[in-house]
Structure formats: structure tokens, C-alpha cells
Image: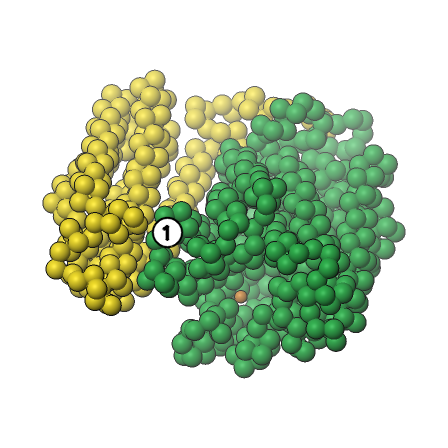
Amino acid sequence: MTTVPYSSSLGRETTYLNHSHKIRSWLLTLDHKRIAILYMISITFFFVIGGIAAVLMRLELMTPQGDLVKAETYNKLFTMHGVMMVFFFLIPSIPAVLGNFLIPLMVGAKDLAFPRLNLASWYLFMTGGIFALVALVAGGVDTGWTFYTPYSSNYSNTYVVLTVVGIFINGFSSILTGLNFIVTIHTMRAPGLTWFRLPLFCWSLYATSLIFILGTPVLAITLVLVGVERIFHIGVFDPSLGGDPILFQHLFWFYSHPAVYIMVLPSMGVVSEVITCFSRKRIFGYAFVAFSSVAIAVLGFLVWGHHLFVSGQSIYGGLIFSILSFMVAIPSGVKVFNWTATLYKGSISLQTPMLYVLGFIGLFTIGGLTGLYVASIAVDVHVTDTYFIIAHFHYIMVGGAVMAYMAGIHFWWPKMTGKMYPEWWGRFSALMIFVGFNLTFFPQFILGYLGMPRRYYAYAPEFQALNVLSTAGASILGIGYLLPLLYLLWSLRWGKDAGPNPFRATGLEWKTSSPPPTENFEKTPIVNEEAYAYHRMEMTGDTVATH
Amino acid sequence: MTPSQPIDPHALDHHHVKGLAHHFDDMDQQHEAATLGMWAFLATEVLFFGGALAGYAVYRSRYGDAFAAASHHLYLWIGVINTAVLLTSSFMMALAVNAAKQGNRKKIVTFLILTILLGLAFLCIKGIEYYLDYREHLVPGNIFEANWHEIFPHIDGAHPGSMMFLRQVQLFLMFYYILTGIHAVHMIVGISVMIVLAVKASRGRYTAEYNSPIDMAGLYWHFVDVVWIFLLPLLYMVQH
Ligand SMILES: [Cu+2]
């Protein structure tokens, strides 16, 4: 890329963070960077709530008998854990925080295409979150995060409608964010920034946005139908009133399977950015990595039926969905192979973001391969509704998506705040999270295979040893998440100044100062090079001075 | 390099062109963004209605007789009149967009008002129709349960299959209200937007160079129109 003028760190600059400190200037901001920070604070809050629910569940599961909480409370705990983590943390995590912050910077624009819509989507997100919180405080929901009918529609006597309204509103926040990203990537790229020069993070968020705008509305209308059935007692999904509960499952998973890719595709984008930087190499097979994102998004819409293998779907339906689910392994495998090939003969440095990314690749591979087990109908029948499923999707959603979110937060923290995080603590907690995660969830694969069912607060005594192991792992994992919260806040005040490009990374976001000025670039940058030109950077020496 | 100054992005008017937001380079880029954004939004809308229509399709293929019987009780002639009203409204909208392209302020306002009035007429007629439906007890739930023999006098309540039939009729009615209801909500949103646009247009906000909002509102309004064209046969003309 050409050397674009950026403000040097001489003297005190005006940045997006310090141009005004009034509360109003935050709550009414149209700056994508500030909105990203608002999202970061909000989703951290929801993560803590979902995390507390998980802690209570793991404590209950220390002993085989139900002793810490009542069975009903346990049902509410796992529902709240799922709702908070899926809808209010994982789905917005990388897109709404890192995507919001980075996409305009990466494409060399001043902002997203629709700044007002962007702010509106944060308000929708918060409104949805408040509905869900009110439901929690009022007494909770016990349906599970999947809201299966007719239990959720006519039989549960908890705050289903309130929660569903919250998720409905939150859905529009996702839609608007996706719409903004698509339009920005299409229409606001800097001169010279062709599609195949885009950072792969943009490609993966583009694919994610397709799911946002095409999947979320189906969830929205489905939740409307659940609400109508519940309020008016009309049998949309209730078999005793002429409805079909399987129809709910089809509609729900038409969104909620692709939602898994809403969590994983952005993670894959982060991995591509980080792995090239810390291997000092261009990505292996750029076009394959880029198109595999789109392929995953498209295929993701065709596999929802693998959640219905035991629900009364026809055997032919099951077979087709099984085959299609296997096919998702192809683009996923392409990515893993390309990342590994990128590492090959690279000059690898194991800084915190890279540790998380390497963790991601390992855990995502385990999560993906066990995904092939459960895509096989015969195995799935054996492990449906057991801890095997829990372990499988936590390897994808925590081992994959959360690891990558952590990688991204550490990688771009210097850009967002202008400060470095403490490297030793960063590596230490990355290690803790990796160890804690595996200790928590690997035993659950075994538990599930042995037949321990999910969603029960009591279990057979022979499962205790593995459950204690899992709870022990969860405490390590918990501390692993707490540490970054503390040292990142610490770094805001006492961290070293980062300078514009502390990791000597390519990409337009590193060509402006840290933290960037409100208008992002002093002059619209011009791009005349592929993304990840690390080979050239290594040969010619860094074109951009780092400090 | 000079360090950047304190900046309020909306005070950044160095290349001030009327109607051009600060973060776009030029009018073309802004218009392209608006158009793509609206089409993406309409794709979302298709899937939103699509979810409900998928449910409708499943039940109609299973309960064709009940759906046909229930559909027969709706006021087809009101639906047809309303279709004509809405199509005319869409035509007025097209004329407003055309006027905006020429930057003709008076025409923009006139045609927008006509579009709005026809939209309101549609909603009024729809409201009257709902009232007539209500008078005939065509409302799923308690009202229907208590009065179904007035609607289907030939049905024997003691017959085991008839209860199922009556529930299927209510499923149809539910889809009728949900689909026309969310369509009406879309109309109300569209009318509200056009009122704002009409006020702005009367103040000369739109010119031959800058008229994207009217163009976008037009796209949206035609979409709402197209949805209705699907709903009319699906709800009012079910044969079996
Ligand atoms: Cu799935």
C-alpha cells in the first residue's frame, strides 16, 4: 500500500475518543468507532450475566443430586445462559464491535454508509436487551434458548413473550448492522481497493451480513407467530389445536443454524488477519479463503434439518440434510488448510493474539470434526440431547468464536485505545483460557457419549468425576476471562503508548493514528497493493515507521 | 502533517453540496449506497413475509378444504377494490419519483399527497373490512369458537372430524390477520415516511440532483404494493 500520511504522535492529538467527553457526545454519536465502543461495553455486560448463569449451573452439577438450586431454577439458568450468550453476546460480538470499528477503516472510508442507522441499531440492541433483562428479573424463562413449541407457546408459565419481544427487537439491530456492512463494502471502498485487495475480515463480515439480512427476518416472524399463539391461543404450532410443532423447528433452525456461522465467519476473518501478521506472510490462497466464507454462508442456509433428525422429519429429508451438512466441512477445511499453509515457513511470533488464533484453529477443528459425527444420522440419534452436543457446539462457539473475539480485541486494542495491553498477562490468560476451556468441555464429550442427557440438574452418580473435572475447568476458564477484563482496563491508564502500527501489520486501519481521528484518515487513502503484502514489507523494510 | 483539529463531522462542510452527507465523496456514491441499502432491506422484507408465507403454504397444502371454506367467507370484492386503490397509489408514487427526477417541487408534493391519500383510503377500507369480518365472527379464538355454527351451519359439532376442521379454519383466519396486519403496518410506516418527505419537498429540499429519499420511498411503496398482489389471491381466492 502507499504510505498514507498519518498524524505522528507528536503532541496531544484530537482523536475520536477525546474530541468530547460529554455523555451526550457518546449517546448521540454517529461515529462508527464510538458506536463500536458502546457495543463493546454492552456485550461485556451481557456476557457477565450469561457467565453468572453458567457458574451457577456448573456449581449445581458438582454433585449428582439437585441441591444448590431447584429444578425450575436450573431450567431458567440454562435458558438465560443461552439467550444472553447467543443473542446478546456472540451474535453481536465480532460484527458489532470489531466490524463496526474496523470496516470503515479497512475500506478507507470516513464512516459506515448509514451512520444514523448504525446508532439506531445500538439502541434497538439495548432495548431488546432490556426486555430480556426485565424478563430475567421478573422471574425468568424456562423454555431453553430454542423456545420449542408447543411448550413455549402454550404450556410454559414463565415470561416467554417478554423475552421473545426482546429477541425480536434485537434481531432488527442485527439486520441494520448487516445492511450497513454490505452497503459500505460495496460502495465505499477507497480508490484502488478492489474486491480482491480487501482484507479477508471484510469478506467474512460480508458473508456474515448476508446471513444477518436473510436469516434474521425469518426468526423474527417465527417469534411473532409464537407470541400470537401464546397470547391468543390459536394453534399455529400446537398439535392439539391443529398446528405443527415441527414447523416451528424448521423455521427456527432456518435462522439459528446460519446463526452459528454468524458467530464463526467473523472469527475466521479475525484469524486471517492475525495469522498473516504474526507469520509475516501473505495468506495462502486468498481467493479460496475469501470464497469459502461466501460458500459457508450459502451452504449454511441449506442444512437446518440436521437439528430435526429425531423430531419426525422424513428419513429422506434427514439423508439430504445429512449430506449437505457434511458439505460444510469442505469450505471450513479449506480455511484450516490455508491458515496452516500460511504458517508454513513463516516467521512466527507467539504474541497474545496469535496464541488465541492458534487456540482457535485447534478447537475449531475439534468442534468441526465432531460436527461431522453429529451430521451422521446414526451417531446423532445416539448423542441427541446429550452433553456430546453441548461439548460440540461449545467447541465452536466458545473455543472458536470467543477465542477469536479475544484475539481480535487484543490485536486491535492498541488501535482502538492507543494503548498496549500487558503482553505477559495477555499470554498468561490466553493459556488459562485454553486450558480451562478444554478441561471444561472435553469431559462433556465423554459424558455425552456415555449418555448423560443435557438440561437436567441431577444426574446418575457414575458421571460425577467427569462433572467435577468440568466444573474445575470452568473456574479456570472464568478467571481466564476475568483477567483480560482487568488488565485491559488497567492498560487504558497505565499501558504503553501503542503508536499507529505496533504489530507492523498491513491494512489501512494501521495507516492512521491510534486511536484514529474522528474522520479516520486525513486524506482518503489510495491502495495499489494486495492485502497482506508482508513478504514485500519484510524485503523492503517497513514502509510505515512504527513509533 | 498537521495534527487534526477537533472535529464535529457534521460541521465538516468543506465540500458542501446540498444533500450530500459528510462521509460520502459525491452524489453518485451516496445514491448508489441508498439504492443498494434499500434493495438489501427489501430482501430482508421478502424473507420476513416469506417465513409467514411458508407457514401458510404448509397448512394450506394440508388443510385445503378448510382453507377454501374459510377463504370463501372473506369479502373478495373489498379485496379487489383495495387492490385497485393500492395500484393507483403506486402509480401516483411513480409519478412523484418522476417529478423528483425533474426537480419539480409542486408536482412532487401533489403526487406524494395523492399517494398518501390513496394509501389512507386503502387502510380505511381495510378497517371497514375487518369490522365486517368481526361482525360475522370471523375472528379466531373465543369469538369464533362461540359462534361457528352461524358461519358453518351445515357442520355437525358432534362429528369427530368437525372440531379439527374448525381449528383449521381458525388457522386460516389467523394467517389472514397476521399477513394483512403486517402488510398494514408496512403501509402505516410508508405513509408516515411520505408525510415527512412531502413536508420536506414543499420546502424545496429535493432537486433534480438530490432526490434519493423519494426514489427510495418509491421502491418501498412498490414493494408493499407487490406484497398485496400476492396476498389477494392467497387469501381471498382459495379454491381447495
Ligand atoms: Cu446446525
Q: Residue at x 80, y 57 (%)?
A: A475
Q: Colour of chain A?
A: green
Q: Residue at x 29, y 29 (%)?
A: B100
Compared across the picture, whether B100 is left or right of A368 comes to left
The image quadrant where one finds the C terminus of chain A is top right
Element at badge 1?
loop
Depth order, front residue of A21/B140: B140
Q: Residue furthest top?
A: B203
B143 sits left or right of A265 in the view: left
Per the rendering, the colour in which chain B appears is yellow
Determine the residue located farthest toward the right in the rendered image: A424
- Write down the quadrant of residue B8 in the picture: top right
Chain letter of the residue beneath label 1 in the structure image: A
Q: In this rendering, is residue A528 above or below B21?
A: below
Q: Label 1 belongs to which residue?
A: A233
* Residue A529 locus on image (x, y percent): 63, 52
Near-viewer residue (A7 or A68): A68
- CB of residue at label 1: within 8 Å of ligand 1? no
Q: Position of residue B159 (x, y in %)?
A: 21, 67
> Which quadrant of the structure image shows residue A100?
top right
